[in-house]
Amino acid sequence: MYDPELLRTFLAVTQSLSFTRAAEALGIRQPTVSQHVRRLEEAVGRPLLVRDTRSVALTSDGEAMAGFAREILAAQERAVGYFTGSQLAGRLRFGVTDDLALTPLPKILRDFRQLYPRIDLELTVLQNEALLRRVESGHLDVAFVKRGANSPSPSRGQLVRRDQLVWVAVEGTRFEPDQQVPLVVYQAPSLSRAISVQALERVGRRSRITCTVKGVNGVLAAVRAGLGVAVMARTLMPADLVELPASAGLPKLPHLDLVLLTNRNAPAEPAKALTSAILASGAPLKPVQGTP
């Protein structure tokens, strides 16, 4: 038997690859995080993490345990929901970015609605900045959004996972060193747009915007048509596109945090139930294949 508290702590570390950020996300002290991981490794009998003063990485057993931990916590959440879900009722307004909506997140929401049939779940799909404004103004109770890993308010929200931003293009894309980099971007304000432009400017690389779109389907269509490159989270990249290697000459991009924000006036128990379901799932997983 593996203690769910230890599993939650371990997943928090795997999602952020940082003991400090895991402690912040869980609201506990860093030594407690280390103790929980050590106790879980003792229970398993194998090392799950490789860590030094600068980095944290999962061992192959750690990768396996992360999958098992999500399954165990998700099963526990389903059991709790089965016996208590009918008691929860009310309206819950949930927002998600359109690219995250293309992951298995809809299945998580479907399972949630089956567990909590008396919760009236209202879904809003918008771009990141619009969702942030709606949470701030009280028009959304919970939002699943993206945040720069170096955000000035890193403790705000619950970290679901940390992802790596990458340059995405069609197979065979090549650039000459003096060639302007063609960019496919979202309409401003856009986090990925700002990050891509700033990254190129820092290394003195010229760029030009070849396509501006409103949603992720526009980004995918333009990139698939060979109009340019886009910046995406690695786990959200569809299988028919490729991550450009370092040899392409483009600068390395920062990490991206995928977080759940909850409005302070949101109905407490329904909001907690939804955030717990998403956190236990480890979402987002992989993009749904065959997405247009």
Image (cartoon, rainbow, N blue to C red):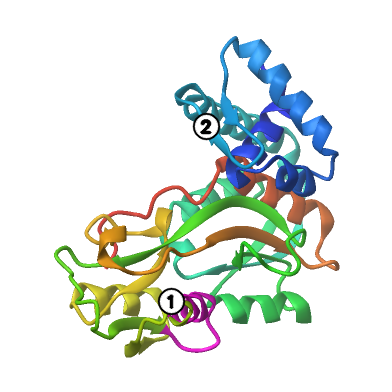
Whether residue 225 is visible to the viewer of this picture, yes or no, is yes
**Is 292 above or below relative to 38?**
below
Residue identified by numbered label 2: 58
**Is 270 above or below relative to 186?**
above
On screen, residue 199 versus residue 30, left or right, reads: left
Residue type pointed to by label 1: Val
Residue type pointed to by label 2: Leu
Give percent across and percent down for residue 229.
30, 75
**Disc 1 on helix, strand or loop?**
loop
Q: Residue at x 21, y 72 (%)?
A: 224
- Is 291 a magenta residue? no
Residue range highlighted in magenta: 186-200
Whether residue 1 is visible to the viewer of this picture, yes or no, is no
On screen, residue 282 versus residue 211, left or right, reads: right
Q: Quadrant of the C terminus?
A: bottom left
N-terminal label among 2 and 1:
2
Residue identified by numbered label 1: 203
Q: Quadrant of the N terminus?
A: top right
Q: Residue at x 35, y 66 (%)?
A: 167
**Disc 2 on helix, strand or loop?**
strand
**Is 6 above or below relative to 81?**
above
Q: Residue at x 71, y 20 (%)?
A: 38
